[in-house]
């Protein structure tokens, strides 16, 4: 097994197969002058000899790449007092996305992925349809797609258009599917679909018919799911997912009896009854205090999970306003200090994205806000600004070992003429690359994926077309999209030109 050969954070870490079939060690170097270090520190790709696809990185003799030779040359030039171009002859991996629009009809505010026909290729589900990969040209109806609306054309002819009224129409409308998740609920080896419908309505999962024709059987398992940003993940630590949401004025989760997952799920409130309602914004979960148990967050507090949840005790509330109108609250250690932080939009229907650094003093936990985007683009490090970041996905987009995130502008949350700011501006979709300029610091570099799609109340990142790098899937009022992640080796100068520049560095 080849490991990083030099000093620094990457020392001793295993190497991996690169997208071009090379054995690659991603070593992070300190700010010291070694033959392999970049000026000021940074990441260096150490490549042992090429290995065939699927082989391990077990080769021991390094191939001296152009990058290796260049960096060694820089050191020698410095010693000899000679000038040399900093990165001459090097290459970098450029990340781009190919847009596939499966439909322009509005069926859902979210989408998910799964291999529904077990052909070994990932498919996409959004609302009443699933789309067959890898080209997504065929779609299958899983429940009655009865929605339609009438639109009068300029010539006076009235036309009936399938789906709910979204970008193809002129008026505001809502779908009956706000979020979609996939899971094998009955453990039969076939991926099923969980649908969170309109806030305040019931929840059901649809049983995969194992390639038999017809609609999927629906099992209603929960009566009332509130909140515009619920989730489906393991809250209790038992290895099985729960519905994280609000219901009846309480914050909590609904848990299945996995011996009979089609039966009604049991509700567990973690809070006293409060002002949680069907259109509340902001929930999340993660281990805030480092005790190994998953805590639950809302926009105004984090709720500490007790040592035992038997008997449904009220969890300890720790007040902190993360955001006045959050969407998903993402818990992760962004700055690498060993403490979990929180990422959130400031207003799901307005402007702003921040990450909240966990700070501990005198045995107490609080958070320090770091603004990523706000209303004024001149105050944003990379000059990027958009409204209504109503959905987030945490993902290591470029496979550098650091978790990035995906978000964008929700298109027409309340229609073309709704009260949300910039309702009709470009429906952008971005991934934000996490970098750590120095110990204990975090910066997020925005990379545009698309400017005519945006997000809904959900955005999904996962391996659809590319087994090495995550793709992005969106369902909203503009339709259903998959953004296929593509990479290519380019000269460093071309790569540098494509990188977002901080405003102070922009030419």
Image: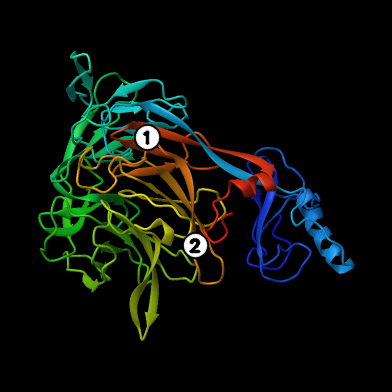
Residue in front for this viewpoint, 318 or 497? 497
Between the residue at mark 2 and the residue at mark 1, the CA separation in whole angstroms equals 41 Å
Q: Taking the image as drawn, is residue 330 in sight?
A: no
Residue in front for this viewpoint, 22 or 409? 409
Eyeballing the image, is 148 above or below 357?
Answer: above
Res 18 label: none
Q: Secondary structure at mark 1?
A: loop
Name the side, left or right, on which 29 lies relative to 121: right
Instruction: Please give the name of the residue rendered at 40% of the width and 38% of the height, measured from the top-left corner.
Output: 473
Instruction: Please give the name of the residue rendered at 49% of the width and 71% of the height, measured from the top-left corner.
Output: 337
**Which one is earlier in the sequence, the residue at label 2 or at label 1?**
1
Quadrant in which the C terminus appears: bottom right
* Residue identifier under label 1: 189
Q: Position of residue 118 (x, y in %)?
A: 42, 28
Q: Position of residue 426 (x, y in %)?
A: 37, 40
Quadrant in which the N terminus appears: bottom right
Mark 1 closeness class: few <14, some 14–19, many ≥20 residues within 10 Å: few
Eyeballing the image, is 92 above or below 99?
Answer: below
* Residue identifier under label 2: 443
**Residue most extreme to the front:** 507
Instruction: Please give the name of the residue rendered at 12% of the width and 66% of the height, measured from the top-left corner.
Output: 272
Q: Position of residue 262 (x, y in %)?
A: 20, 39
Q: How many marks?
A: 2
């Amino acid at each position: 097994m080849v490991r990083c050969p030099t000093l620094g954070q990457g020392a001793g870490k295993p190497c991996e197969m690169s997208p071009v079939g090379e054995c690659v060690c991603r070593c992070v170097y300190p700010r010291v002058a070694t033959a392999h270090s970049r000026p000021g520190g940074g990441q260096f790709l150490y490549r042992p000899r090429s290995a065939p696809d699927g082989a391990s990185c077990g080769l021991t003799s390094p191939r001296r790449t152009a990058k290796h030779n260049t960096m060694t040359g820089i050191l020698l030039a410095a010693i000899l007092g000679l000038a040399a171009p900093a990165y001459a002859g090097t290459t970098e991996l450029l990340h781009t996305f190919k847009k596939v629009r499966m439909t322009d009809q509005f069926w859902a505010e979210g989408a998910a992925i799964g291999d529904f026909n077990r052909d070994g290729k990932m498919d996409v589900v959004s609302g009443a349809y699933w789309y067959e990969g890898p080209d997504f040209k065929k779609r299958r109806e899983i429940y009655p797609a009865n929605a339609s609306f009438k639109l009068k054309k300029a010539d006076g002819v009235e036309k009936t258009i399938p789906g709910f009224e979204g970008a193809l129409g002129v008026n505001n409308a809502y779908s009956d599917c706000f979020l979609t998740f996939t899971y094998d609920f009955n453990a039969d080896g076939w991926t099923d679909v969980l649908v969170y419908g309109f806030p305040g309505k019931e929840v059901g999962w649809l049983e995969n018919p194992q390639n038999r024709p017809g609609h999927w059987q629906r099992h209603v398992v929960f009566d009332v799911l509130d909140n515009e940003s619920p989730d489906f993940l393991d809250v209790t630590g038992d290895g099985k997912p729960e519905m994280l949401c609000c219901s009846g004025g309480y914050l909590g989760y609904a848990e299945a009896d996995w011996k009979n997952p089609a039966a009604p799920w049991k509700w567990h409130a973690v809070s006293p009854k409060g002002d949680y309602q069907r259109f509340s914004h902001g929930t999340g979960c993660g281990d805030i205090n480092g005790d190994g148990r998953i805590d639950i967050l809302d926009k105004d507090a984090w709720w500490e999970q007790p040592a035992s949840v038997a008997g449904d005790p009220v969890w300890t509330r720790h007040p902190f306003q993360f955001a006045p109108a959050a969407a998903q609250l993402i818990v992760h250690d962004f700055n690498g200090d060993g403490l979990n932080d929180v990422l959130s939009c400031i207003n799901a229907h307005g402007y702003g994205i921040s990450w909240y650094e966990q700070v501990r003093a005198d045995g107490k936990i609080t958070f320090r806000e770091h603004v990523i985007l706000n209303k004024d683009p001149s105050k944003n490090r990379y000059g990027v600004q958009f409204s209504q970041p109503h959905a987030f996905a945490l993902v290591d987009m470029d496979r550098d070992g650091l978790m990035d995130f995906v978000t964008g502008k929700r298109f027409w949350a309340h229609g073309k003429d709704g009260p949300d700011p910039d309702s009709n501006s470009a429906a952008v979709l971005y991934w934000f690359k996490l970098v750590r300029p120095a110990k204990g610091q975090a910066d997020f570099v925005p990379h545009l994926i698309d400017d005519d799609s945006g997000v809904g109340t959900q955005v999904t990142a996962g391996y659809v077309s590319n087994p090495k790098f995550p793709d992005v899937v969106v369902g909203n009022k503009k339709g259903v999209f998959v953004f296929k992640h593509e990479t290519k080796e380019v000269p460093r100068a071309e790569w540098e030109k494509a990188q977002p520049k901080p405003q102070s560095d922009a030419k």
